[in-house]
Structure formats: C-alpha cells, structure tokens
C-alpha cells in the first residue's frame, strides 16, 4: 500500500521535516507511559490523546505502525533528577498499601480513563518491573564501554565523556556546570551524571528490589525507557514521544545511555506535547491541585468533549484550560451528534446509498488530509469537518461517509452516534 507524505516537527532539529521511516511503509514508535502512583490528570491525558492522534494519522496514511508504551511502576523518583524517594513508595505510605498494589490500581485507572477518551491501547504495553533483566544488561554494556562507574553502592552514567550531551534540549553544559549547586549526591563525579542503578544504600525503605551484579537494588527511571524501547523496537526508533517536560532531563538521558550502549542514533524524530495550562501554570500532581477525567464526567460532560478540546490547538503548544472552553467543546460535540443523527434519518428516508465520493466531497477529503499530514494540524482539520457539515452541495449520505472517514483519525466515535430519545410528558 502506498503511504502518504507526512511532515512532523522534530524537537531534535527544531524544524519541520518530511517523515521518512527507516523501513519503507513501517513505523516504530515509543511513547513514555504513565508513572502509576496517582490518578492521571487531564494534563497527562492531553499527551496521550496527542499520541493516539499521531498513531491514527500514521495508520490512516497507510503505514504499518508498532506502538510501544511503558508503564513506570518503579524507579521514578519525586524529582526527575536523582533526588527524593521512589514515587511508588510515597504513594504506598499515603494509602496504606504496598507498591505493587499501588501500581496495579493506578494502571487500571489509567487505562479506564484512556478508554473513556477513545485512546487505542498500544500494540505493546511493557511494565518496568517485568524488564529488569534487560535494564541490567544495558548497564553492563555501558560499563564495558567505559560510560558507567560505581560509586557509593550505585552505578552512574559519566556525562563528562559525551561532548554532545544535552543536544536534544540544547543545554549549555559549561553554563550548567558553572551554575551547579552543591551536589545532592556526593557519590557523583559530576553534578550532571545520573543514576543507572540504585542499591539499597540509596533508600533503605525501598520495597521493590532485585538482585544485580552491583548489589540488591532497582533501576533508574531513565534507564527503563531505553531498555524497553530497544527490546521491542531495536537500536534505532523512528519516533519517540512524550511531554515537553521530558526534554531537558529524561529524554536527554535516554539519548545519552542508548547511543553510547549501541553506537547508533537512538531516535530519528522526537515529538513532544505542550503543557495544559491553568492560568500561567502547567497542571501537575506535585502541586496537589489537579483535575482528573472523573471531575469532567461528574459535571455531566462527555469525556470525548475533552478529546475534541485537545484538538483545538497545536499539540506542541501550550493549551489554556478552562471549564468554559470545555463546555464549548461539549456543545460542539452535541451539535455534531445531532447533525449526524439527522443525516442518518434523511439518508434513510431518501434512500440515498453511500456512493463513491463526489468531486466536492473529494475536495473536502483532500483538504482534511492536507491538514492532518501537516504536522497534525487538527484545529484546521476540524474546520474542514465543520465545512463538510455546512456544505449544501453534499447529500446526507456523503456527509456521513466523510464524517466516518475523518473519524478514523479524530476518534470521536461517529459510528456510535445515535439520535437522543427524549421522553416528552403528555402535557407538553
């Protein structure tokens, strides 16, 4: 099958690039999954909606996609650097459970919210706790190549040996070193070095621990994604996605350890989702104040309204959150559902079969594809959808046909939209 040409914004190069996969017609994509220690907030879910839209677009364009997402159920500290405790342990104490119970509960919550947003489950979902052997093997390769060192019972990556460290975030290493505060971890040779493996000398209360050549302990968060991505997708990935907050630390460290372990480029196209912001601040669990999808449904709003809301701005820019904006998306969704229900009725009454697209319908289809293939410009693609709804030259059957086609990417569940049955009292 011939594939369409797609243009994507590559964080690594800071420019729009024509997407060319390593293997013609196939895409290997890895997305950083949730750290399952709390309810996912809607800022988190914006990133997963974007990734679902990306995968749907690639498949619509004719590519065979292998989509891998991890579940971080160990190793992610309360800071993205090597500071604080494991988030799982903090949650376990908070809720009076063990870390495994916490991980299991919030993994189920995450996928429940994803289902409500019509986010398709990735082809491969991999838990960090089930891939520790691969992580240990990766650390050993880094040791053999001289990029890892043992100190104070832990294993660290030696950043000083990488002249291009920080290329994704375009970090000024000299400036960072000059401004570095007193090292939190006295065992590091360099403040920018990061932990690959923690032993029990780091946190005595750590529940999740495994035997390793360096002692009983657990992996660093950055190590996990590199090991799992390469396990399922090989040394070089086509696309790696995540939130914009992953650029400076997590994805920077993934690149460092992955490329030094294999001697090959780790990722060809890096795509990052912008923050969902409330006022001037990003939505984050660390603040203690965050909104979940449950709050949306409690107000009687269809969760797919949030999916629609996410498409009203560029995925890589900040998106301003407000209940008014979400209500606007909900009203739009209700109006679209009503129109689709009416078209179904009209198409049935006029015996209009779903025939091949007319010239005008073909023009609208092309316009829709031009927008989604242009760095996932869904705001403009939605404008094409509204043009389709209002176009008097199209029959109801053609509109239904086009809406169904658009929805292969939008994922708003058009096929399930039915007329709302109202029980009207006899007096009215």
Image (cartoon, rainbow, N blue to C red):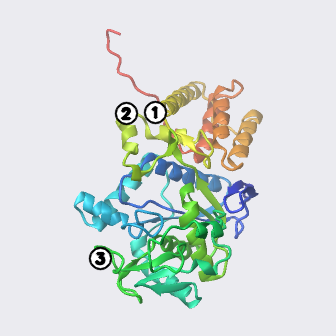
Residue 238 appearing in the image: no
Mark 3 or mark 1, whichever is nearer to me? 3
Mark 1 or mark 2, whichever is nearer to me? 1
Please tell me which of labels 3 and 1 falls first in the chain. 3
Q: Verify CB contact (< 8 Å) between mark 1 and mark 2.
A: yes
Please tell me which of labels 3 and 2 falls first in the chain. 3
Expressed as whole percent of the image width and height from the top left, the position of residue 117 reads 46, 46
Mark 2 neighbour density, 10 Å: few (under 14) some (14–19) many (20 or more) = few
Q: In the figure, is residue 265 to the left or right of 101? A: right
User: Which secondary structure, mark 2?
Assistant: loop
Q: CA distance from mark 3 to mark 2?
A: 44 Å
User: Which secondary structure, mark 1?
Assistant: helix
Residue corresponding to mark 2: 299
- Image quadrant occupied by the C terminus: top left
Mark 3 neighbour density, 10 Å: few (under 14) some (14–19) many (20 or more) = few
Residue corresponding to mark 1: 323
Say above or below: 143 vs 350: below
Q: Nearer the viewer, residue 268 or 119?
A: 268
Q: In the figure, is residue 379 to the left or right of 193? A: right
Expressed as whole percent of the image width and height from the top left, the position of residue 172 reads 66, 66
Expressed as whole percent of the image width and height from the top left, the position of residue 357 reads 71, 38
Say above or below: 391 vs 238: above
Q: Nearer the viewer, residue 395 or 38?
A: 38
- Image quadrant occupied by the N terminus: bottom right
Q: CA distance from mark 3 to mark 1?
A: 44 Å
Q: CA distance from mark 1 to mark 2?
A: 10 Å
Residue corresponding to mark 3: 204
Residue drawn 42% across the image and 71% down it: 128
Mark 3 or mark 2, whichever is nearer to me? 3
Residue 156 appearing in the image: yes
Please tell me which of labels 1 and 2 falls first in the chain. 2
Q: Nearer the viewer, residue 278 or 73?
A: 278
């Amino acid at each position: 099958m011939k594939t369409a040409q797609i243009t994507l914004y590559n964080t690594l190069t800071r420019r729009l690039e024509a997407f060319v996969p390593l293997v013609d017609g196939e895409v290997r994509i890895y997305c950083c999954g949730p750290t399952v220690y709390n309810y996912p907030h809607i800022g988190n879910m914006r990133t997963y909606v974007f990734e679902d839209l990306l995968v749907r677009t690639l498949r619509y364009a004719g590519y065979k996609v292998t989509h891998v997402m991890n579940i971080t159920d160990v190793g992610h500290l309360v800071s993205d650097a090597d500071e604080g405790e494991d988030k799982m342990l903090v949650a376990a104490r908070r809720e009076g459970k063990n870390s495994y119970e916490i991980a299991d509960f919030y993994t189920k919550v995450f996928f429940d919210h994803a289902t409500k947003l019509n986010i398709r489950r990735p082809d491969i979902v991999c838990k960090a706790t089930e891939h520790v052997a691969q992580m240990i093997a990766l650390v050993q390769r880094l040791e053999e190549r001289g990029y890892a060192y043992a100190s104070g019972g832990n294993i660290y990556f030696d950043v000083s040996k990488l002249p291009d460290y920080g290329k994704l975030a375009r970090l000024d290493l000299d400036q960072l070193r000059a401004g570095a505060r007193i090292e939190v971890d006295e065992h590091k040779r360099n403040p920018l070095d990061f932990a690959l493996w923690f032993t029990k000398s780091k946190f005595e209360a750590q529940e999740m621990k495994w035997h390793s050549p360096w002692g009983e302990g657990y992996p660093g968060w950055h190590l996990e994604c590199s090991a799992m991505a390469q396990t399922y997708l090989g040394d070089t990935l086509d696309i790696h996605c995540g939130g914009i907050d992953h650029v400076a630390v997590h994805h920077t460290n993934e690149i460092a350890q992955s490329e030094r372990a294999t001697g090959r480029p780790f990722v060809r196209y890096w795509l990052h989702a912008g923050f969902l912001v409330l006022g001037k601040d990003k939505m984050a669990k660390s603040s203690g104040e965050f909104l979940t999808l449950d709050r949306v449904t409690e107000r009687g709003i269809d969760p797919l309204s949030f999916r629609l809301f996410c498409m009203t701005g560029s995925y890589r820019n900040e998106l301003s959150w407000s209940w008014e904006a979400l209500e606007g998306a909900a009203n739009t969704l209700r109006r679209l559902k009503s129109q689709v229900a009416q078209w179904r009725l009209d198409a049935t009454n006029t015996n209009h079969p779903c025939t091949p697209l007319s010239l005008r319908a073909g023009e609208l289809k092309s316009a829709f594809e031009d927008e989604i293939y242009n760095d996932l410009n869904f705001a403009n693609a939605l404008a094409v959808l509204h043009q389709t709804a209002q176009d008097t030259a199209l029959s109801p059957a053609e509109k239904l046909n086009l809406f169904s086609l658009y929805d292969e990417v939008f994922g708003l569940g058009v096929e399930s939209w039915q007329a709302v049955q109202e029980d009207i009292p006899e007096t009215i």
